[in-house]
Image: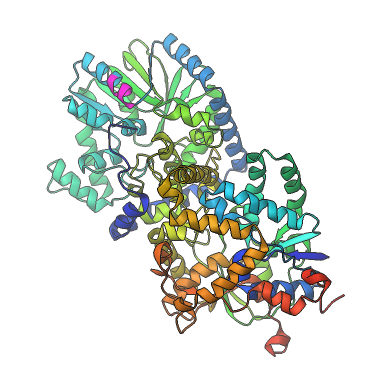
Amino acid sequence: MRVSLFITCYNDALFPDTGKAVVNVLERLGHQIEFRPEQTCCGQMHWNTGYLNEAVPIIRHFVNVYRDAEAVVIPSSSCVAMMRDHYMKAAEMENDAKLAADVETLLPRVYEFSEFLVRRLGVEDVGATYPHKVTYHASCHSMRSLHLGDIPIRLLKQVRGLDLQPIQNIQECCGFGGTFAIKNADVSSAMLADKVRTVLNTGAEVCTAVDNSCLMHIYGSLHRQRTYVRTAHLAEILASTASELGVAE
Amino acid sequence: MSERQWHTREFPEAAKDLLQNSQLRKNVQHATTVIQGKRNKVTAELPDWEDLRESGAQVRAHTLRHLDHYLTKFEENCTRAGGHVHWAADAAEANRIILGIVQQHSAKEVIKIKTMTSEEIGLNANLEAHGIWPIETDLAELIVQLGKDRPSHFVAPALHINKQQVRTIFQREMNLPELGDKPEDLATAARNYLREKYLRIKVAISGGNFMIADSGGVCILESEGNGRMCLTLPDVLISIIGIEKVIPSFRDLEIFLQTVPRSATGERMNPYNSVWCGVHPGDGPKEFHVVLLDNGRSPILADKESRQTLQCVRCGACLNACPVYHQTGGHAYESVYAGPIGAILTPQLLSMEKARSLPYASSLCGACYEVCPVKINIPEVLIHLRSKVVQQDQATFAGKFSLWNIGMKTAAFVFENADRLVIAERLGQIGQKPLVSKNGFIEWLPLMLNGWTQTRDLKAMPAQSFRQWWAKERGSESNGMKSTGKKNA
């Protein structure tokens, strides 16, 4: 399949390794990856902060760039949630039937990365090896908008050597919430403190998720506290193989 | 909302104070965890839970679309059954109506069942100002009243304090220095304090969970029996109810009597479910009044994006599920209506000029929407209200040239076009250098971004973005746009 990678704005600038990992995993599974350099952002930050009018051109841009894509894969559930929850609303707000029709035909071909693997490709074992103790943080949008359920867990369970540690209060938000982390920095920090405590309680070396935004937030505190716990996007774990690690299968 | 000065501080400021109160946070976290756990258990045991939510949402939405019809139908049927229906456009009018009825009966004291509309219009303060003493009979409301505190949760108003704190209040206010702190000690003290009042006081004031249009009935769900006492013992009963609380027919209770108690307290059924129609000789109050309160509701009804706010049945499930509420409790919202529903209801009731920080008091995690028994998409309404705040800001000089607006406008300009984004990334990679510590992290950020680095480090932008890597590694193929898999055909 010809898979178009929408890296997302923040992954592009801050987490390029996640993009490389997505490319790695999907190519390993025999798919062709394309990267359309015209891509920018999904518009989530503007939309969620209340800058709806400013988000519209960004939304149009996304739709225009990917109109003819066979499948669009996105390593960020909140960006996919932005599209599924709000793109149609944006078209309605603009009274733009053409945009609405475009959104309607494009969105069924847009997938979050883990969702693409399991629901679209039907793959759970991607041949990864990752000999570490890992805990999984379920991001709010992955749970409540995309309803990923145990998809990421199923993928992690197939990884050789991976010791998956369940986390307490998995349903609780880490407190990131985009501009919320800045506008309500104190409350956000209090939420994060609770989240980080549950991460540390698992005894995991690595905290993973399908959203680098949460992980950036969680790692912000883990690093400030000088813990040795790292964060890694699910794609980076799935990209890790025995041959790369130099260990026997 | 008027009378009482709600929302004098912005949410982040009020929250900051409450976050320092570790006892309060402990109480709130404990209580919400317990209620939420019970709620999850009793909703999971219903195979048709999602259908019930959908039905509840549809009944509420339908009623709101035809509110004029159902309200006049309610008025007609309630009047026919012997009740008196009053229409109050705002808090002042509602206060005037209620005060008039109480004074007509020369009452110096009134007993009250917990009612949020009464809080909303500042009824207690108004009655006190006219020499009338309102006595709260709901245990938690009584605690709040005697403690000269504010409710922090509209189902469990004293959720923010624990039993030791309750004992201290009762010891002081009921003059019971020897009182213990066992739940039964506290309940007995409250019972003794209230029982005499039920038997003596002739006027009662309540709210209402539902008004039933086809019978003119009013329904109240409660757990302590104090409500049943207030609804049956006094001669005069006054119920003050928001206009949105009407449902078409008695049959619709089938849905809400399943969803509301489960959502509110994690019970399958409320211990006391009272439904009454007008007055009946020799049975219950001789005089019954309903005050229909608008007080800012009609304009909400007119806004099709946020109309769903009025579907609310005040179960409080969204408060118990909310990670923000878990941290701060209800007082941070500086509003009668706290939590996620308060964050959307309060700014609308106050008109969007006030409480403008409340729509931002959410990480948009969606936990509220997930538990709402009438499926109010609170995150969606929050965003809608945020857009109103932004538009108001952009209409002023200060707002237009604020750092936020300039920042967001600039970002939007950048995201419209990849060439601009490439330049912005380059600028970021270079511009961040003075901020990056030796360990490769940003530990301090200026201005509004400083909130981040108070508790969090930020990994610096890597020298190469993904798109730069792609262009370098794979850029040769088909105009730098596409590649075929390296390892597989």
What is the chief secondary structure element of the magenta stretch? helix
**Can you say which quadrant of the picture contains the N terminus of chain B?**
top left
Q: In this view of the protein, can residue A207 be seen by the observer?
A: no
Classify residue A111 by image quadrant. Answer: bottom right
Residue B393 % position (x, y): 45, 45
Numbered range of the magenta stretch = B91-96
**Can you say which quadrant of the picture contains the C terminus of chain B?**
bottom right
Q: In this view of the protein, can residue A214 be seen by the observer?
A: yes
Q: In this view, does A144 lie to the left or right of B194?
A: right
At 30% across and 24% down in the image, what residue appears? B92
Residue A170 % position (x, y): 52, 62
Answer above or below: position of A160 versus B234.
Answer: below
Q: In this view, does B225 lie to the left or right of B481?
A: left
At 40% across and 54% down in the image, what residue appears? B326
Please name whichever residue, B188 or B460, is drawn nearer the observer in this view of the structure. Answer: B460
Q: How many labels does the image show?
A: 0
At 45% across and 81% down in the image, what residue appears? B437
Residue A7 % position (x, y): 67, 66
Q: Is residue B92 covered in magenta? A: yes
The outermost residue toward the right is: B489
Please name whichever residue, B340 or B26, is drawn nearer the observer in this view of the structure. Answer: B340
Here the colouring is rainbow
Q: In this view, does B202 lie to the left or right of B472?
A: left
Answer above or below: position of B21 versus A219.
Answer: above
Answer above or below: position of A199 versus B255.
Answer: below
Q: Is residue B130 covered in magenta? A: no
Classify residue A213 by image quadrant. Answer: bottom right
